[in-house]
Image (cartoon, grey):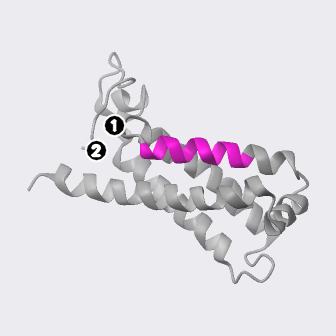
């Protein structure tokens, strides 16, 4: 059995899960929903931090949905959600305004999904992918590979 046949659907599922969660939160960030304002006020970066993170999350969504850039989108979403998880654990708390930990759980889900995408598509990462393959002279930048 070809491992590509099992990795590709799994990778797409992870990409779509991460992209959908990130995309649905954009509405709240960009419209200035009260919960979103509360979060960024608590972190001391309202409103510019909310807009900046929203913009970066929009970039992550786009990257995750483009096969050529999905590996970078996975890494990007990992970085963003590592920041979100850190904020929950240090300043916000697991439960924010009585949400039962929903936002924290969504951040963990995107973190895990993004990590899965980055791992499954690791050979597609520019420069890093070629090093992982043991070919430091070649770069996978600009190539469209499916997960190995």
Tell me residue 30's x, y (percent). 74, 52
Q: Earlier in the sequence, mark 2 or mark 1?
A: 1
Give the label on residue 32, or none.
Answer: none
**Which residue occupies 77% across, 57% down?**
31
Observer-nearest of 71 and 51: 51
**Which residue occupies 27% across, 57% down?**
9
Tell me residue 41's x, y (percent). 90, 60
Q: For mark 2, does the 10 Å Cα neighbourhood hold few (<14), some (14 to 19), or many (20 or more) residues?
A: many
**Which residue occupies 37% across, 32% down?**
129
Q: State the residue lying farthest toward the front.
A: 31
| Element at label 1 | helix
> Which tag is nearer the camera, tag 2 or tag 1?
2
Tell me residue 113's x, y (percent). 46, 59
Rendered position, 16 above or below 70:
below
Q: Magenta stretch mostly in which secondary structure?
A: helix
Residues tagged 2 and 1 counted as in contact (Cβ below 8 A): yes
Residue topped by disc 2: 147
- The residue range painted magenta reads 53-65
Residue 123 drawn in magenta: no
């Amino acid at each position: 059995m070809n491992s590509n046949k099992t990795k590709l659907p799994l990778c797409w599922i992870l990409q779509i899960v991460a992209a959908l969660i990130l995309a649905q939160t954009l509405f709240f960030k960009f419209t200035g929903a009260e919960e979103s304002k509360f979060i960024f006020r608590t972190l001391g970066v309202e409103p510019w931090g909310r807009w900046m993170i929203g913009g970066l999350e929009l970039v992550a969504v786009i990257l995750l949905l483009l096969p050529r850039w999905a590996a970078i989108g996975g890494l990007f979403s990992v970085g963003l959600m590592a920041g979100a998880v850190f904020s929950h654990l240090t300043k916000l708390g697991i439960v924010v305004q009585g949400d039962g930990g929903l936002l924290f759980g969504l951040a963990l889900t995107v973190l895990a999904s993004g990590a899965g995408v980055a791992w499954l598509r690791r050979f597609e990462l520019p420069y890093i992918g070629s090093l992982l393959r043991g070919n430091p002279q070649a770069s996978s930048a600009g190539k469209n590979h499916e997960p190995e």
